[in-house]
Amino acid sequence: MKFLENKATVMPLVAAAAMLTFGATQASAQGLFEMLFGGGIKRAPQGDFPPPPSRNGPKYKAKPNGGSKRSGAVQISSPSYYTYKSDPLVRVNFAALAATPGPRMPLPEIVEPAKPQDAAFQPSSATNAAFHEAIAGLDGYELFAEKDIAKALVAYYSANPDFIWVTGTSANSRAQDAVRVLGEAASYGLTPADYLVEVPEASASTGDADARLKELVRFEMALSARVLRYVRDAQSGRVDPNRMTGYYDFPVKPLDMEGVLKTLAHTQQVRTYLESRHPQNAEYQALRVELESLQASAEDEIVVDPKLLLKPGQSSPELPKLLTKIASNLDDEMGGAYGETLARFATGEEYVPELVPVIEAVQKKAGMKGDGVIGPRTVAALVGASKADKIQKVQVALEELRWLPSDLGSPRVFINQPAFTASYIDNGEEKLKTRAVIGRTTNQTAFFYDKIKQVDFHPYWGVPQSILVNEMLPRLRRDPGYLDRAGYEVVNARGKRIPSSSVNWGGYGANIPYGVRQLPSEANALGELKILFPNKHAIYMHDTPQKSFFKRDMRALSHGCVRLQDPRGMAAAVLGTSVDYIAEKLKHGHSTEDVTRTIPVYVAYFTAWPDMAGNVEYFNDIYDRDTRLQQAIDSTEAVRSPAS
């Protein structure tokens, strides 16, 4: 669908057609404004600034701030975070299995005897009969599992009344393989106790046969339940991110649990199958390697207060530790320039003027602004996080990667919010990496993925309702003609342009029946281009006139969208063309161009993430999301801990 803004003269006609479809009600007016001003794509982003909506709620919530609706006290609030509550486990109801008819005995036939370890894969009437006999041992058995797992367990064994993990009177080799994989869960950042199953001891030559059969059938059910939990956790993660906050938006990954058990009942490659349920990408593997390395390493003896703030002339007992850490990491060039200075002041607690050039130099080497002020970002860059903090960041990153597709795709665009960067990756090579500005803590950028749709040159900015209500409306009540003078257009519910000064802005609260857009210009909030990937969060990548923001180390400064330091380079990359072509397009005013290839874009949030060489880098948790995810994981662990 082409942009409707290309010719202003067609707007009334389009608006009239739209009104026949949607009606001229106030409720439909905003939908019309989105179609007219939102970049020409239904449900397209509305601007740089709106925060993403709650997944299961209205797009924005009107929050009274005291006073009446017409007094101007109404605000449109951002999405919120929720206290994560895991669903309780349920007791598996084995009554349906007991009611399943036994197998019919077939006519005798001559068959080649099955190998002992293949018996589970070649069900026979004899093993069926043994399984039906064993079902009685489930009477009174209290096995707890997630509701969908409990349902799948009963459904599978009702349709397939046979053992998977038991051959004869013992746990078979496939069971041993499965138990080993479950016991290695920690190497994936998972908790082995969540999948713990006690394996029956090897069968003795004598003993109570009924008791043994009872023990085996209970082991069979427990192992199947924990294998299903493991597969689901490996594929999708332990927590549902969409239940944590309205800032998260991930599609459900379907999982045929009965199919999982059916596959395991017909393959001898149990380990291979279970390990294949994890994400199969280089980033996941690099994080696993980092986790293993961290778990095997010793704690760093030098630990500097991560909240240290020290300016020249001030003193702190943390300074000598920081200087020692800097001295231990000096290369030949830095050592030649500053080694003597560091040695002279190594034990002093006062931040003397002689040390300022040293700090500035190491800050710049770490990619920071060399201002000489020692703060949390400097400490993090020069000292790094503690071993415990790094382990937690890696475990959180592994969990978050399970929310994404196993194959991240190539080419792709990857935005990592805590790193304040956006990258274009193709065929395993990072062909473009640019600094980015993301949402402020009060206007956070969402975490989701989508597909690049188009590039908009010299874009209009459709002002979202949140910005119009929260930021513009107070001024418009004092100065109704402000929009007319500032390069904006106002359109009523019929698509007709009207003067801003003619609107009684004081008569509206959170629901304003007018659309507002900023015309293309050097002052336009979106700069010279924007890159669209239609999503309900109204987020996209774009240029900005505020170039100075890219010089800052902490770049959580926007209203929610992602501003790029090199928007032309990113536009050229996704369009598969050159920067010169982009420059030429910009000479001809407003236009759009579709992205014809499939290019996924990840608006991601990882405080631990590997570079293209597999080296894991660590970043500050700017939105405190790691803490919230850990709370959700803890909630899940608490529910699972009493499970039998």
Image (tube, rainbow, N blue to C red):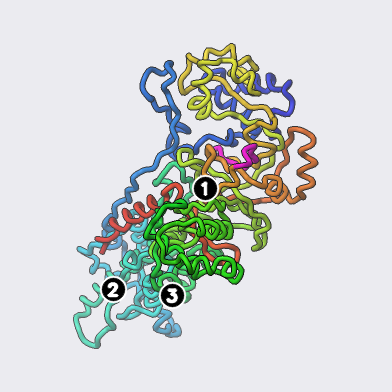
Q: Quadrant of residue 297?
A: bottom left
Residue located 49% across and 61% down the image: 382
What residue would you read off at disc 2?
A: 198
Specify whether residue 542 is painted magenta.
yes
What residue would you read off at disc 3?
A: 121
Residue located 45% across and 29% down the image: 76
Q: Quadrant of residue 480?
A: top right
* Label total for image: 3
Rendered position, 340 above or below 8: below
Rendered position, 313 above or below 60: below
Q: Between disc 3 and disc 1, whose residue precedes? A: 3
Q: Residue type at mark 1?
A: Met
Please tell me how crowded label 1 is: few (under 14), some (14-19), or many (20+) other residues with Cα within 10 Å: some
Left or right of 71 in this view: 429: right
Q: Between disc 2 and disc 1, whose residue precedes? A: 2
Q: Mark yes or no: residue 135 visible.
A: yes
**Mark in front: 2 vs 1:** 1
Query: Dots 2 and 1: beta carbons under 8 Å?
Result: no
Residue at disc 2, secondary structure: loop
Calculate the distance from the C-alpha at mark 3 to the C-alpha at mark 2: 23 Å
Residue located 69% across and 30% down the image: 520
* Closest to the observer, 57 or 623: 623
* Closest to the observer, 490 or 328: 328
Q: Position of residue 576 (x, y in %)?
A: 74, 51
Rendered position, 251 above or below 212: above
Q: Position of residue 163 (x, y in %)?
A: 36, 72
What residue would you read off at disc 1?
A: 554
Calculate the distance from the C-alpha at mark 3 to the C-alpha at mark 1: 58 Å
Query: Dots 3 and 2: beta carbons under 8 Å?
Result: no
